[in-house]
Image (tube, rainbow, N blue to C red):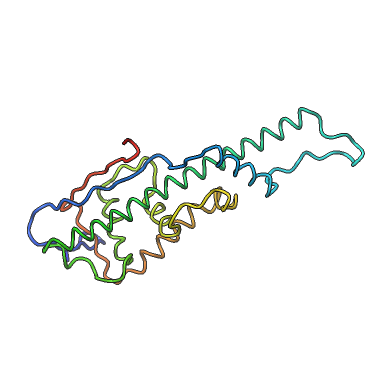
Amino acid sequence: MAILGDRRFVEIAGSRTHELPPLLIRTTPNVRRLDKVMGMANELVEGEDMIPYPAVDSPDVAPAPDVSRIDFERRKMDLAVNLVDQYLGFVQQWQWGDGILEWIRQCEITFETRMELRNLLRSDVWPHAGRSSFVVLLEDKAVQTKGIELEKAMGLRLTFRQPPPLKCFSNQFLLYLNGSLATAAYQTWSAMSTAPVSALPPERFNFEIVNMSLE
């Protein structure tokens, strides 16, 4: 086991660079009916009374002027659009996590077929927290994610087998809790690794990133 600074790296026999399976990623949110998602966002805004209706002076007074009504409807539309944007970002993050999880499965198969790598993975029930070393490997290789946080993406995939429809979420989750819950899920999972936790040396591995959204 090699130690560099405060990090431990597994030692791999030989000097060859190992080719890992490609990481297949969808960078465009896979949402078939954007109009339905927008409808769910409108229902969420209406159902949770996220924007109060303009008050009137008394019950006998006529409804708010047209200008106030138009502004009220515009604010509701803006909030619904914001919720849709948050949801599409959630789906994109989840898709990265799903791609990483499948990539880890393929890497496990690769490790099992190579004598130099076979003993590096513990043979526990999958997905063992020790597999977080593959997420660290992606970070060490400085994979270009265009703003996607790998640990957050993995946390969302560990939490959700499939991305739920927008109507299943509260506005609090989409606007405030999404990132913190996903990060906590990943950190809880990775912290279950049996000590000592050793990273995979990035200079010993190569792999390609394939954007499936371009096909």
Whole-percent x, y for residue 168 in the image: 57, 53
Query: Height in image: 114 above or below 203?
Result: below
Point 56% across, 41% down: residue? 36
3, 94: nearer the viewer:
94
Judged from this view, the residue extending furthest toward the top is: 67
17, 63: nearer the viewer:
63
Image quadrant containing the C terminus: top left
Image quadrant containing the N terminus: bottom left
Point 21% across, 51% down: residue? 21
168, 96: nearer the viewer:
168
Which image quadrant for residue 160?
bottom left
Whole-percent x, y for residue 139 in the image: 30, 51
Point 52% across, 44% down: residue? 86
Which image quadrant for residue 127?
bottom left
Horizontal arrangement in the rendering, residue 11 relative to residue 77 (left or right): left
Judged from this view, the residue extending furthest toward the left is: 14
Whole-percent x, y for residue 165 in the image: 53, 49
Judged from this view, the residue extending furthest toward the right is: 60
Which image quadrant for residue 144?
top left
Whole-percent x, y for residue 108 in the image: 23, 61
Query: Height in image: 9 above or below 80?
Result: below
45, 68: nearer the viewer:
45
Number of dots carrying numbers: 0
Query: Height in image: 174 above or below 72?
Result: below
Point 37% across, 52% down: residue? 97
